[in-house]
Amino acid sequence: MSLFACPVCQTMLTPAPRVWACENGHNFDIARQGYVNLLPVQFKHSKQPGDTPESLQARAAFLQAGHFQPLRDALQQCLEQLGPVAASLDLGCGEGYYTEALRDHSDQVIGLDIAKAAIVQAIRQSPKTMQPIQWLVASGAHLPIANKSIDRLLSFFAPLPLAELQRVLKGEGHLIVARPAANHLTSFRKALFGEIIKQDQDTSLTALGEAFQRVFLDTIDFELRLSPESLKQLLIMTPYGWKAQPERRQALIRQVETDGEWTTSASVQLSVWQGKPTL
Ligand SMILES: [Zn+2]
């Protein structure tokens, strides 16, 4: 059985060495880099959906420098406790920093993102000696994934399309979610806005609670020791950086260039969910 569904007609999509095809004759080529583009033009709302190349490069460099290693370690621990499964999917995987953690605990791993540039970067960074990850360019709102085929689904700072999650996750499957906690980057935000602006209420988790029950919750707190270079990357990759006034942004950069290093604290909520039993 294929894990994949045609993004156009939803029938089974059969992977093959060069072209993936469904029974209705929709074909999807495997790109030279190895990913499959399952994003039909009608789902593509902009020429370059997803992150800009600039924010993508900044995030890739920031993550590769290991600043979020404590979160990946916490994910590893969580996966060890949950045990091995057949199929895992990283939804909105970006350049695959967390996708890699799924490998040791799953026979098949899929990394999916709407941004082609992110997937290309993921392939570039992914170790070639290990069991391969299937990388897909696709929409999270219309997952090209078969019904009830996924044991484990990751959404790290990515959308939570409730109906699609319910459709693709197996009954006993787990959903692992990472979201900024209330204290995430407090001193960073204070430096940029002069005060701690209350974060927008994250309604996606509330909506999730309607169909899923939370079986695990932890807050992962860790320090970010930032060089001027990594501070600039953080400013590009977070919404706080774009929203701040340019003068404040420049002032923070100048301060960190003078001091050589700056420390702020990250705080991330890691939660695991399971589908509510249907009555
Ligand atoms: Zn089709």
Image: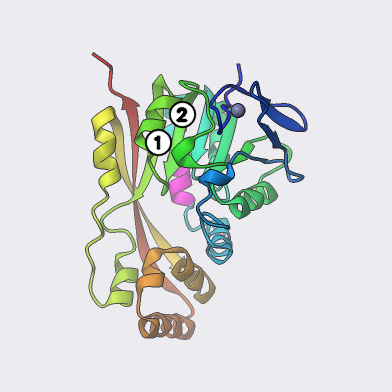
Which image quadrant: the C terminus? top left
> Which residue is most to the top?
279
- In percent of the image, x 52 and y 56: which residue is there? 46
Local packing at callout 2 (Cα closer than 10 Å; few below 14, some 14-19, many 20+) is many
- In percent of the image, x 51 and y 58: which residue is there? 51
User: How many numbered callouts?
Assistant: 2
Q: Give the secondary structure at mark 2.
A: strand
Distance from disc 2 to disc 1, alpha carbons, whole Å, reads 7 Å
Does the segment drawn in magenta span residue 49? Answer: no
Is residue 75 something one can see in this rendering? Answer: no
Local packing at callout 1 (Cα closer than 10 Å; few below 14, some 14-19, many 20+) is many
Asked if the residue under mark 1 is in contact with the one under mark 2, i.e. CB atoms within 8 Å, the reply is yes
- In percent of the image, x 47 and y 44: which residue is there? 73
Q: Give the percent coordinates (x, y) of residue 197.
A: 23, 67
Q: Residue 27 is drawn in which quadrant?
A: top right
Figure check: 37 above or below 85: below
Does the segment drawn in magenta span residue 75? Answer: yes
Q: Give the secondary structure at mark 1.
A: strand
| Majority secondary structure in the magenta region | helix
Q: Residue 266 is drawn in which quadrant?
A: bottom left
Mark 2 or 1 closer to N-term?
A: 2
What residue would you read off at disc 2? 152
Figure check: 257 above or below 120: below
Q: Give the percent coordinates (x, y) of residue 261.
A: 46, 75
Give the residue type that dot 2 points to. Answer: Arg
- Foreground of the two, 131 or 224: 131
Q: Which residues are magenta?
A: 69-76
Left or right, 96 with reference to 151 = right
Q: Give the percent coordinates (x, y) of residue 78.
A: 42, 34
What residue would you read off at disc 1? 176
Give the residue type that dot 1 points to. Answer: Ile
Is residue 276 something one can see in this rendering? Answer: yes
